[in-house]
Image: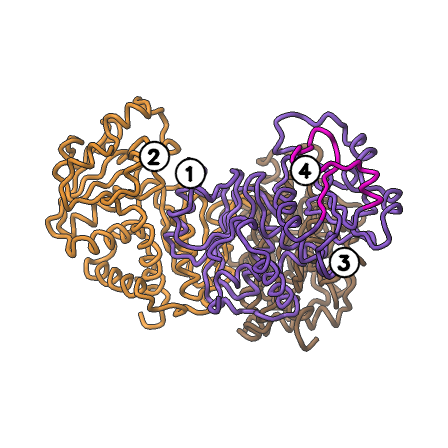
Chain colours: A orange, B purple, C brown
């Protein structure tokens, strides 16, 4: 493992061993184990969770951290994505954490950037560390993956989370469905009526409508969306006893999820965020650690 | 002391012991004493002094620091204040330093956020660390509080500094007055004619007109303001020999304070800023230190 | 050496000793040698290379680092440049790295700010650490300065890089020329036809057209600029065997430099960026180190 572009490139064994390493991090192991390594965080798109949980993971591991602020950079003078990344490589960093608006941005860097790259999200394609934290959360809950049923509900078409998750979850033996408005449906995946999804799934994973990635306005009003596809307290009651709610966040309270549901007993949303720090520590350790 | 929301909640003894601890920090003690503690600075409003002196205090104490940049965050995608704060708590930080535009923003967090919160200013209500640095500066100057006369001059109505200061200063036995334009007068407090305040006070504390918090435009022009309520060199000459000038800053040179007065002999403005680092170290130590 | 305002103020011996120190840093020496020193980076203008290579240098030296973000600061409430700088001095920092739009901004600080200031670029006047990294790159290439011919091509008039470089390079015995469009010509310097410069120079240093510093629009279109003054692969072939290409960056691919030329064999552009970290470490060590 030299980079972390796409989860697709990792074998199941490698993924499970990353989750094991993340669990060790959760137990307080590995602190300061990357002491002195220099990491730059390059977020060309806004981010809270991914950006600052990488930042937290790096700090916990004892790294020296450079946080790039696009708004105060030479991007404002027209400098390109590639030249910015190449500049940070030239500084001699040990690793680059990158998020960009372009699908598979890393293709333009392969063979040209010679330090490890950690993909913190590329366009609507991949988000490997998000999937890892989702898997960690699921494994903590159920102890296994085989046979679990998940429905990913909402703006699937524009969601890197959905694409990355379905690929890896199917490899792990899970049954994956999509649900939500017709207009965000991706024909590749098996569609399930929302009410049925609520009743039958082990995991309901909700997605935010990502207005910023759309070319057209949503046809439903937010009220209509909530009524038809929002997870309301009434719908939560119809879920199976053992079933859980997940969301990569940020979420829109009152749209895809009711206000009261965000922190209800079935919700694992903030647990996912906690786990985000551990899986990012694991990925950094795996790629940059001495003993890999 | 589990949080630092409002100075009101602290006993006089606790406040004086914080000032003592700040003096120790000024003498170079306690460096790196919070080694490895993880602090996130969440400033939802622009800030120079408070933001970066907290940052400096944290660095001096050896903390690992995460600086949130709202402009590059998911606030841009509509994420709420509460969900942002809850996200940082989920990262496992040891403390959160928060400034927000909303009065008493911390009320929405009580019982929901389980790590210590350091209030770096809430709307026009409280600014506890600012008051502490003001008190430290006054004690360094006069050696005591009892009987000292202070006038707070200017935009009192919209000033969290004024509200927090008057409450605690009266408890400490100081005599507090307000002065300045009629329109910014807060009826709760004792009003003093500005020329009288200049001549009779031990401490003149000037405030900036906070245009960004007003709904209506100021009726005075800046020139008129300066003429009627600006601290000019001529007025400085009328102050008592031992009297001092304070200002929480940022200040508007040529409006509430003449350019030449900012760094004159009576001014303690930059000393206040120095003290800001020490009181913030003290507050962090008190809440997060091992020996509390 | 108490500050680093302008290279002009340094003797040749001092400059050469800084380059020697930078070479030691390149070899991995001096890491963490400024352990615990507190540095604030104040960039009032956007920057990628200078800002983050100073940041990298500081991290490598073990400093505690405060990064000022103007967009989230009290500059938004009208606070001045001077008052912002004075505020950071009051925090007790050991050094300030400053870039500002104003020519010779440091003049307003002399005698008032009592900690070392590292000039990271002032308006269109000076950029001492950029010149140092250019000199380091040239010395690595040629082993000496005496007699080398350099042409600086492009927007010379508005370029602090050009002004700082020509002064020091002439002192070092180099022959300096300028070239490029008539409108950016600085009458002080010896002008050379571009085609001649391409054929005869040891070093071609290209500059970006700095639209953001101009009052008038460029008369040439970018296509015309590229045709007349752009370094194309065809022109690279006419350069001398041993000649090299430099650029302070950011560059505009397809304007002053063809896309394919940026990383061609003759280009030292990313090597310059590498060297930027080493010279900045050297300057910080020289001014803040124990043994100066």
Residue at 21% across, 40% down: A204
Q: Which residue is mark 4?
A: B189
Q: CA distance from mark 1 to mark 2?
A: 9 Å
Q: Chain of mark 4?
A: B
User: Mark 3 — on which chain does it sit?
Assistant: C
Residue C50 in sight from this viewpoint: no
Residue located at (13% from left, 50% from top): A173
Categorize mark 2 by other alpha carbons within 10 Å: few (<14), some (14-19), many (20+): some
Residue C180 vs residue A40: left or right? right
Looking at the rendered structure, the secondary structure element under dot 2 is: loop
Q: Relative to B177, does residue B148 appear above or below in the rendering?
A: below
**Marks 3 and 4: which is nearer the front?**
4
State if disc 2 and disc 1 touch (CB < 8 Å): yes
The mark closer to the camera, 1 or 4, is: 4
Q: Is residue A27 visible?
A: yes
Q: Is residue A206 magenta?
A: no
Q: Which residue corresponds to mark 1?
A: B80
Depth check: C104 or C131 in front?
A: C104
Q: Which mark is residue A253?
A: 2
Residue C169 x %, y %: 73, 61
Give the farthest residue toward the left.
A147
| Residue bearing the label numbered 3 | C167
Say if A249 sits above or below A117 in the image. Answer: above
Asked if labels 2 and 4 touch by Cβ distance under 8 angstroms, the answer is no
Specify whether disc 4 shares its chain with disc 2.
no
Question: Whole-percent x and y of residue C132?
Answer: 66, 62
């Amino acid at each position: 493992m030299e980079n972390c572009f796409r989860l697709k490139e990792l074998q199941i064994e490698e993924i499970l061993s990353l989750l094991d390493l993340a669990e060790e991090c959760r137990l307080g192991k590995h602190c300061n184990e990357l002491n002195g390594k220099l990491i730059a965080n390059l977020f060309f798109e806004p981010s809270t969770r991914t950006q600052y949980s990488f930042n937290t993971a790096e700090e916990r591991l004892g790294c020296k951290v450079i946080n790039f602020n696009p708004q105060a950079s030479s991007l404002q003078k027209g400098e390109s994505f590639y030249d910015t990344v190449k500049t940070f490589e030239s500084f001699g960093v040990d690793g680059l954490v990158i998020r960009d608006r372009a699908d598979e941005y890393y293709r333009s860097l392969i063979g040209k950037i010679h330090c490890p790259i950690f993909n913190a999200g590329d366009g609507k394609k991949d988000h490997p560390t998000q999937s890892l934290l989702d898997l960690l959360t699921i494994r903590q809950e159920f102890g296994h993956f085989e046979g679990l049923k998940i429905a990913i509900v909402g703006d699937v078409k524009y969601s890197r989370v959905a694409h990355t998750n379905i690929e890896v979850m199917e490899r792990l033996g899970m049954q994956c469905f999509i649900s939500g408005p017709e207009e965000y449906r991706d024909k590749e995946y098996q569609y399930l009526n929302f009410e049925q999804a609520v009743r039958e799934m082990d995991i309901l994973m909700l997605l935010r409508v990502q207005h910023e990635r759309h070319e057209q306005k949503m046809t439903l009003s937010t009220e209509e969306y909530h009524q038809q596809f929002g997870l309301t307290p009434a719908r939560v009651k119809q879920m199976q006893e053992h079933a859980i709610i997940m969301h990569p966040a940020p979420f829109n309270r009152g749209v895809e999820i009711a206000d009261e549901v965000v922190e209800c007993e079935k919700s694992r949303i903030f647990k996912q965020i906690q786990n985000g720090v551990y899986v990012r520590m694991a990925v950094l350790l795996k790629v940059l650690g001495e003993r890999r």
